Amino acid sequence: MNDSANQEQLSADSASNHSHAGGAPQAIIAVQGDDISAYNQGLTPLDPAQKKLLRIRMIIRSLILLLLAMAAETVLHVKFGVMMGMFLLPALLFVAWMVTLLPGRIYRRWGYDMGEDQLRILRGYLWRTDTIVPFNRVQHIDVAQGPTQRSLGLSTLIVHTAGTHNSVVALPGLATDDAEMMRETIKGHIRQEMI
Amino acid sequence: MSDLAASDQRDVMAEAPPFHHLHPLTIFVMTFNGLGRNLLLIPVLYFSVFNRNLGLTALGTAAVIGLIIGFSALRWSRFTYQVTDKEIRIKSGLLHRNNRSIPFDRIQDVSLEQQLLARILGLATVRLETGSGGGDDGTLDALSLADAEQFRDFIRDYKREGAGDSPGDIVGERTGDAEASQPAEQAEYPIFAMDMRRILIAGLFNFSFILLAILGTVAQNFDFLLPDGFFDPRNWLDSLPDSASFNSLSAAQRLIGAIGAITTLLFIGVTSGLVSTLVREYGFRLDLVPSRRPGFRRRRGLFTLTDLVLPIHRIQAAVLQSGPVRELHGWHHLKFTSLASDPSGETDHSSAPCAQMAEINAILGYTSISNAAADLAYSPVNPAFWWRRAVMTIVLIGAISGLAATLFHGGFYALLLLAVPLIILNYLDWLHHQFAIDGGQLFVRSGWWRRRLTILPIRKIQSVDVSQSPLDHPLDLATITIGIAGGSALTPLKIEAISKTVAMQLRSHLLHSTESHLTGVIYDPR
């Protein structure tokens, strides 16, 4: 069998399959080549406010970390006479990285794409996962919002499928209006079917 | 407003069918089981509470039995169920009342189970599976066998009213009502059964050390009954007629002894496989129920009899399991994946535990799934699948043996020899991890020792992941994980170590394509 011809035919097929409404098709086809380095592969980024939310979470986490580091530092200094700062300084550096650089980094690696008939969600960098859920496979949808999210006007879109794997697919960091719009779009595709 | 609600309720009450109790003998079964669980209480009463006073102990025991009977009767009286035209409602609970309604639409399969006592009394437990993940979705424990069978048939023949009646695209039965137009009264007929010989063959391949483990546990828990030092081999040697005679045994004789020990272990393994298979699969038969919604009816069990009906339109995928020796003799284990899990605790519904391909094809013929063609060309996955694991194995074992060798004894370097069989296993696993697309179905093979072929109609795919671990990035490889309605959440269907480009193409095919242009596509693993 002629492999290369097959491959070409396949890419042509996938190109036609990806004729989405948004401006995404070129980006997706590019991804099928070698565009690994693109952070979210040209997909729609999350709402910028999500970066703030991530930063707030990181600040809370870093406070806990600093408290622990201070406790460890004191114990080590008093009991074993370890020089002050041996523990706290690296912790401070790490915390500074967590609060300044990490939120943006996590944010950049998220992406989603509302296709005509499917939702695509990309997340992670080292452990990268790229999920596609066809709309007509969605069982039900949640739009969830925590207190911090509410103050920033953000929501999480949660899509439930019948699959045992990926039974819950969550897309955080959407503007509430967007999330609700997406919910309505997907809702229109849900069919009453039995499994 | 309260008037309105009241009149509403009255209307409903007037039309609604009555609430039923379970079979009264259930109280007896519950009491019996309750007694079994509390049997240890009697020696406790005798020895510690009543200080070896027989009369008081008898009184106390009677009180305990009375309590258990009363409690069982109370639970029985507080458990009622109602069967309406659309759903079953179950009210249960003594203090914390629970009122559950299960629409017939959502019931995946119905199974009847008869444990030994229930069989003697003519009772059967009805289990309803909705696939909600909790497992125990609705249990009627127990009805009389006749009632249970009638109830099962009622649910099986239940059909939604109205136009949206065909099972729908998500399950992919396009034919839908073609079968439905068949007369419902056709008798069911057997399509697969296992005689004693077949069960023995299945048992031989079911080699396990479960019996040994059970014996060990029993011995440990009851070692107070055994003489002191029972497990100390030295005592055994001492009890030999002349222990000196053992020391004088030649190396050859000791070798024979070792072989004898291994043979005993093998014998125990084979026996426990045979026994557990016999207990589970005794009288295995699979019938086709040609009702309006055809289904497979499976009966099996030596002591506990189970009787399960799996509606064919609920089937999501077929799984064929085998092993190196089994496959050589043509034996395979056919399972069906559906949203509900098998009441026996397995995630898939075992439908033919030991069958030749011809028999399996006959069973598959009743479903919309077709077996892999003999000449189906599978695409291999990237060789990195095995050499990456081999490298990691060597690094890990090397580190462990190096550490042990420097700390304890140079002989620990011999541990490195362990890497050889492991790497060979990795390589064989790679040879057996393949995939193919043919006739609108995805075929995925995996495992050399535990061989598994999953046949998944593409239209039943719920979601597809393409994921990359840090080790995948430098090689530009990816893993595809497919969401199926059913099967194990821990081991989902995966195609590992294929190039990212292929993974992306494969995914868009799995999600978008119609069946026509998919036949015979071969993917280059690189």
Image (spheres, rainbow, N blue to C red):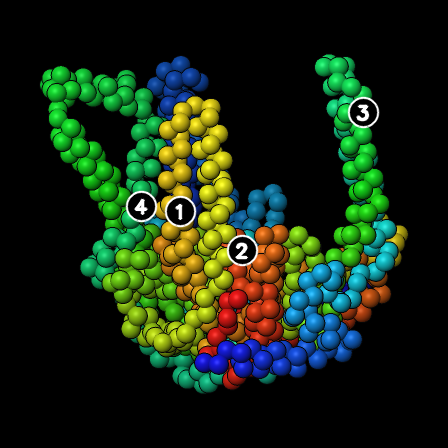
- The CA distance from mark 1 to mark 2 is 27 Å
- The CA distance from mark 4 to mark 2 is 25 Å
Which SS class for mark 1?
helix
Which SS class for mark 4?
loop
Residue B489 numbered mark, or none: 2
Q: Give whichever of discs 1 and 2 has the lower sequence position.
A: 1
Nearer to us in this view, B277 or B519: B519
Pair 4/3: label in front: 3
The residue lying at 82 percent from left, 66 percent from top is A178
Q: Which residue is mark 3?
A: A85
Q: Does residue A125 sit above or below B43 in this rendering?
A: below
Q: Which residue is mark 4?
A: B208
Q: Which residue is mark 1?
A: B422
Q: Are marks 3 and 1 in contact (CB under 8 Å)?
A: no
Q: Give whichever of discs 4 and 1 has the lower sequence position.
A: 4
Q: Residues within 10 Å of mark 4 (few under 14, many from 20)?
A: some
Do circles 4 and 2 both sit on a common chain? yes
Q: Give whichever of discs 4 and 2 has the lower sequence position.
A: 4
